[in-house]
Image (spheres, coloured by chain):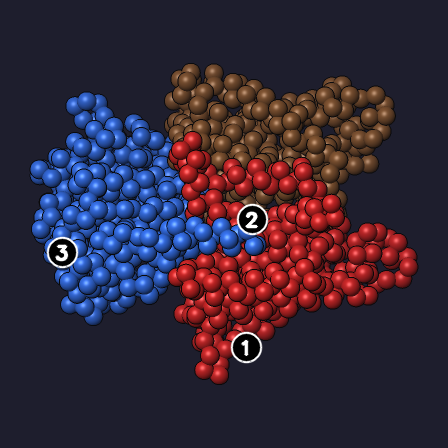
Chain colours: A brown, B red, C blue
Amino acid sequence: MSATLFLEQGLNGLQFGLMLFLLAAGLTLVFGIMDMINLAHGSLYMVGAYLMASFVQATGSFWLALPLALAATGVVGALLELTLLRRLYARDHLTQVLATFAIILIANEAVRLVWGSQPILLNAPPSLTGPVTLPGGMQYASYRLLIIGVGVAVAVLLYFLVAKTRVGMLVRAGASNREMARAMGVDIGRLFTGVFALGAALCALAGAMLGPILAVQVGMGENILILAFVVIVIGGIGSIRGALVGSLLVGIVDTGGRAFLPLLFGTFLPPQMASAAGPAIASVLIYLLMAVVLYFRPQGLFPARG
Amino acid sequence: MSRVLPIFLLLAAFPLAMQAMDGLFYVSLASRMLIYAIAATSLNLALGYGGMVSFGHAAFFGAGAYTVGILAAEGVTSLWLAWPAAVTVAALAALFIGAVSLRTRGVYFIMITLAFAQMVYYLFVSLKTYGGEDGLALRGRSDPGFGLSLSGDLAWYYVVLALFGSLAYGLHRLAGSRFGRAIEAIRENSARAEAIGFPVYRYQLACFVISGAAAGLAGALIANQSSYVSPSLLHWIQSGTLMIMVILGGVGTLWGGALGALALLGLEHLIADYQIGWLARLAPNYQDHAGLAVGAVLLAVVLAAPRGLVGMFARRKSA
Amino acid sequence: MKRFAGLATALLLACNAQAADQLKIGFLSTLSGPAGGIGVEIRDGFNLALKLAGGKLGGMPTEVVIADDTLNPDTGRQLAERMLRRDRVNLMTGIVFSNVMLAVWPTLQQAKVFYVAPNATPTAITGKGCSPYFFSASWPNEAHHEAAGEFANSKGFKNAFLIAPNYPAGKDALTGFKRMYKGAIVSETYSKLNQLDYSAELAQMRAAHPDAVYAFLPGGMGINFIKQFVAAGLSKDTQLIVPGFASDQDVVRAVGDPMLGLFDTSQWAYDLDNDANRRFVNEFEKEYRRIPTLYAEQGYTAALIIDQAVRDAKGKVEDEKAFHAALMKAPERAKTPRGKWKEAANGTPIQDYYVRALVKDRQGRIVNRKIATILHDHRDYWAKDCPMK
């Protein structure tokens, strides 16, 4: 096993983790501030990817389409919040599960109606379809480097927003103690809609960035949703910092596991078995990680609730 | 009880009517729905009565199914060995998972049960000898011995119906017993229950294990129903579907699980299989988009019927 | 519950009147999800043949019941059961994926209904487990991969890195390649079925420096793999060889120019020189406004085979012996786009396999042009295990 293999898998893990962060950030805020389990978060990710693909087709440019897709998905998110999700804040978690699950079904069908049931094409911008040579001579897909760059930029921006601005302070107050924040005069309604729209835009960013690598297809949200939940539980509900640390942990463990466990098993198992056991055990590692974290820190690594 | 009897008589007469009309396929369909009714009812015990939101019940369902499947693959097809084994395996799994998970609360409990279920799922996916991701076909249904056979649709339906009835009766008695009422008290306010002197953890664990065991029985039945087991029985979406059935039907009610299962599966089948003429003229492909209708119905139930379908029926009866 | 029973009863009575003398074909396929495009291609090819035959196969009015297994073996089983028991189909076809095929097969066998395979032809059903009810109109699972192995030999590649999804056809694929290929196997890697991100496997490929990479990744999996392979810069040093499934028009539409220079193997090419093929390609482009893939050809040919066999058996689909004999002779009698081919006793085709290359045609479209015939009258390796001779 060479150094380049480790480096490349490390970058892969970073890339995956940062994209998970985009999803987890929105999810943790919604859960932390509004105390709402939103299973439809994955659907916003899917809608974002589809809108991106359509805008790219319409404008012919990846870079033009991106802000359009983010804005459009943010609007979708805000509308969803204003019409449906608002009614769920007061209800219990189980009801929220049922309602947002229904939204997943409706969203999947709506997407199928508008775009058809085949996966649609979303390609990386032509300038980024090839590799870059990293210092040290190794080649890496330039588009994946872009993803890493975008992820880091968003993390920094979010940190700035949450830690250094007034809006961020309101968000943290709401996450920490909603009733108190309301009592202090914060317009909770607008704050909620804003937070939800922001979460939706982040989902769209993840969907748009990952679309060229994965496939833009109906149901793409469900797979990544469960990982996002694991991330926010590990990180601590309501905490952006927790979401970042959690997603990096999950990203690296998952990628490293998928990459190296089959190799490890291949030394003493036949190829088909090694290839089946490897990814399976790698997936289990994530849940094991969560169980271990919860054992030592039952509220996650950086709980927001005071 | 008096409301229930005519319904059970109808359920018993149903397959005979279907046989007369050459519709045995529907008997098979009905058996499948009843099996899911059992599974959902088992979850309702833990979730509804016990207040333990288990997002990993598919693990017990699937473990029961795979016990039957693996035993069959190894040549053990006797019903009297396979089914109790399935229940035992599921109960042990519930004991282990419950023992660890019940030390947590709220959303963390939900996530831990999910985590364990996913681990069990991936365990079975990696078992290439027993089919792995592609699943395992059984050569036939479990053998009841005495020269009898469960391969006929009618016989199978009655066995499933009998088990469902027994389970419902069992739940009814359990809910009314001291244990049952203690569980509900714990669900309402576990701190107070503890203060009164109930061994909260032990009662919850017992409830969880019984619930898991019943799910295991449902699993054994589903393995027999299709003569096929696959890891998808253990996936978190399966757990989610069971939860949806319970919530839809009515959390913490006797018939909530069954009603939810029948409603969800029935709705899916009705839309996919039976074309409504005027709707088809309006929207020719509407049957391909069954999810829209199912989602809309679920949403409507959530917004209009806070206590699920059972709540709807109960209200109507009293009006 | 009462209401449901009543509704079901009423509708059942209404549906029970069924025309005799009608051919009812159950088309169970994967029509959605990452690999859904394959089922759609097969369906479109099948429907085109049906349309050109005026809606009648073998002279009998034909109804096709279509269902989507969503690449889920359990769903496939349930749908097959429904088609057989409720819809009373007398023929089945359509299955794309081998894991669904193997899950559905016991149900089909029990029902004693003939199945014409437009795609998946797993070795488990063509070797020891062969059956007169199984007729493949496509190819034995290992064929394209054997052709590719032979091609890799002809190009002098000394070592190869193999990758396929971890399911029966994936295993068949790499087994077939290894049977013919004489060079060294650097790695035999199985990815997850429907896996979309190949960064881990690509990193291993980079570290291994093979002469060639052989990748069996059908549908959406292939689209992603090829895009990522080129993006990672691996296409410069390593020749990518794929079976025709991973580089036909569906993938071309998705990936585009990065695919030029790829080689693949297939039982059919759009530029095969015979009248039936010219008609097929022209009609398909007219009807669907796109170039057909090998999947579309398989669906089209399956329909032609059914048409010929039903005609030759004079409509008696239930007469097992007569219909089986008619099916066996059908490839030689029907005019299929592949030209002349035969069916072996174990229900698999004996035919030629070609090497194709991704090039631009005169109109600037990227197409799979036939370069050479690499295997002639090639038989299924596992026919030797089949007791039927």
Upstream in the sequence, badge 2 or badge 1? Answer: 1
As drawn, B23 above or below A181:
below
The residue drawn where x is 76% and y is 19% is A166
Q: Residues within 10 Å of mark 3 (few under 14, many from 20)?
A: some
- Tell me where residue B4 appears, x and y as whole percent: 66, 61
In the image, are marks 2 and 1 on the same chain?
yes
Q: Is residue A202 above or below residue A268?
A: above
Q: Residues within 10 Å of mark 2 (few under 14, many from 20)?
A: many
The residue at 83%/54% (across/down) is B190
Foreground pick, C164 / B58 = B58
Residue B264's disc is 2
Judge whether residue B101 can be spotted in this image.
no
Q: CA distance from mark 2 to mark 3?
A: 45 Å
Q: Residue at (19%, 49%) from the top-left corner?
A: C60
* Camera-side mark, 2 or 3: 3
- Foreground mark, 2 or 1, reads 2
- The answer to which of A306 and C349 lies nearer the viewer is C349
The disc at residue B81 is: 1
Q: Are marks 1 and 3 in contact (CB under 8 Å)?
A: no
Q: Which residue is mark 3?
A: C314
Tell whether label 1 touches label 2 (CB within 8 Å): no
Say what amino acid the circle numbered 1 marks. Leu
Q: Amino acid at mark 3?
A: Lys
Tell me the quarter of the picture where residue C212 sits: top left
Q: Quadrant of the C terminus of chain A?
A: top right
Pointer 3 indicates a residue of which chain? C
Q: Quadrant of residue C367?
A: top left
Q: Is the residue C382 above or below the residue C170 in the image?
A: below
Q: Position of residue C186 (x, y in %)?
A: 33, 50
